[in-house]
Amino acid sequence: MANKNNLKSENSNRWLVFFIISAIYFFVYFHRVSTSVIAQDILKAFNINATALGFMSSMYFYLYAFEQPLVGYFTDKLGARRVIAYCTLAAAAGCFMFALSPGIGWASAGRALIGIGVGGVYVPAIKAFSQWFEKNEFATMIGLLIAVGNFGAVIATTPLAWAANNWGWRISFHIIGWISLTLAIGALFLIKDFNGSGATIEDEQSSGQDGTGSKEIPFYKALLSLQFWILALIFFGVYGIVITFQGLWATPYLMAVLETDRIAASRLNMLIPVGFIVGAPLFGWLSDRIFKSKVHVIIWLLALLTLSWTGILFGMELGMLSVFSILFFMGIATGGFVSTFWAHLREIIPAGILGSVSGLLNPSPFLGVAVFQVLTGALIDRGRLIDGAYLPDAYKSSFMLCFLVSCACLIISFFLKDQRVQNV
């Protein structure tokens, strides 16, 4: 009877963990792409150019990226609950600073603090889910988490555009700050850390013969693995170009190429996170239940992503059906890639150091976004700026760069292997 009660308690706890972490992760993606919708407001409010805007937006990604090894380390040492709660408090403070900023310098500092705050969510979530859910549920739960996050990206399109038009971008971010503060308190006092080892029987058997498990293995040995660096390079490129497009240039580009207003363009931009919402849990479930090789799935998804970039370059003027398909399948390919990517990592890294290794790997996608936001901004600045907006041709060279990066990532993915990394 006691065992049944304990089982019910564990089931209740794990779903509470999932729902609160997911609610917080909603705002991780919201902040990641929100600059795209308010880009014109920021340009006018601070009288800056695209390069300065790209730098301000990139502050989120630089700080997010650089803190990941520390986040991973403290997740393994302190537990997911406290890391998530304290970091969400920092994100709330960043929202308030951004909303009150008198100039681009303070706005960049607020954006940086938001990056620090939301950077302490995903790696602890991976650790928490690997402990509270079975191995054959892990990719599905990560897919669902990414879907919730991308719902935040959906809200950062048309709903944020509506809020910015009616209340102003400053009041909108004040509201987000108060919501984040409430969620941080909820994470600190409502959810629990897992009391067990977090490793399945399979993990313990494969982590060593001495029965001590993988916790005694130095996590930094992952850096000696070629597979680790291949994964990091692919993640750097894929995530960097997609989130740069979705989070910064998609809305103004669609406004220019389709000659439409911000609300209509933001609705089209919404198709990318909608594709994420479909692709992440779908391919997470398929990875758990159907596909034997996650590497093969990654390769096919990168091929679909490269095809989407071809459409961005050459298919945006073929009609609205073409635009819908290109943006939606870009989201599906990227969402499926991310959930399958982390499921693949879960299989090749011992459970006891999963948080720390994830923290070492997770800077790569956000460094990619930071780098590509500045690079694409510099390329776009070579075009013509009329009445605070760039003409469609100004975006072409930056999107060609993204296409070439996608091709390179597809080629590199053929060197991935399914087996557990050596030296770890």
Image (cartoon, helix red, strand yellow):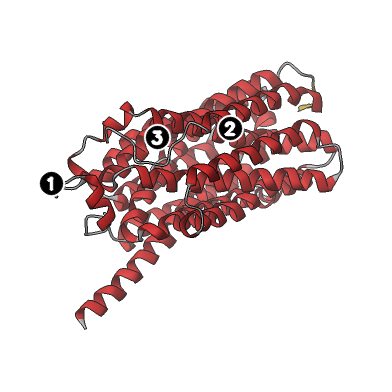
Tell me which numbered mark, 3 or 2, is placed earlier along the sequence. Answer: 3
Residue drawn at x 59%, y 52% is 279
Q: Which mark is residue 170?
A: none
Q: Which residue is mark 1?
A: 210
The secondary element bearing badge 1 is classed as loop
Tell me which numbered mark, 1 or 3, is placed earlier along the sequence. Answer: 1
Q: Is residue 334 found left or right of 367 in the rendered image? A: right
Choose between 299 and 128: the one closer to the eye: 299
The answer to whether the residue labelled 3 contacts the one labelled 2, judged by CB atoms less than 8 Å apart, is no
Question: Looking at the rendering, in which quadrant would you find the C terminus?
Answer: top left
Q: Which residue is mark 3?
A: 361
Q: CA distance from mark 1 to mark 3?
A: 28 Å
Q: Nearer the viewer, mark 1 or mark 3?
A: 1
The answer to whether 177 is drawn above or below residue 42 in the figure is: below
The location of residue 207, given as percent across then percent down, is 23, 45
The secondary element bearing badge 3 is classed as helix
Tell me which numbered mark, 2 or 1, is placed earlier along the sequence. Answer: 1
User: How many numbered marks does the figure carry?
Assistant: 3
The location of residue 232, given as percent across then percent down, is 45, 31
State the residue lying farthest toward the top.
382
Amino acid on which the number 3 mark rests in the picture: Leu
Choose between 11 and 21: the one closer to the eye: 11
Amino acid on which the number 1 mark rests in the picture: Asp
Residue 60 shows in the view = no
The location of residue 251, given as percent across then percent down, is 72, 39
Q: Which residue is mark 2?
A: 410
The answer to whether 42 is drawn above or below residue 178 in the figure is: above
Choose between 41 and 9: the one closer to the eye: 9
Amino acid on which the number 2 mark rests in the picture: Leu
The local crowd at label 2, few if under 14, some if 14 to 19, many if 20 or more residues have their Cα within 10 Å, is many
The local crowd at label 1, few if under 14, some if 14 to 19, many if 20 or more residues have their Cα within 10 Å, is few
Q: Is residue 214 found left or right of 186 in the rendered image? A: left
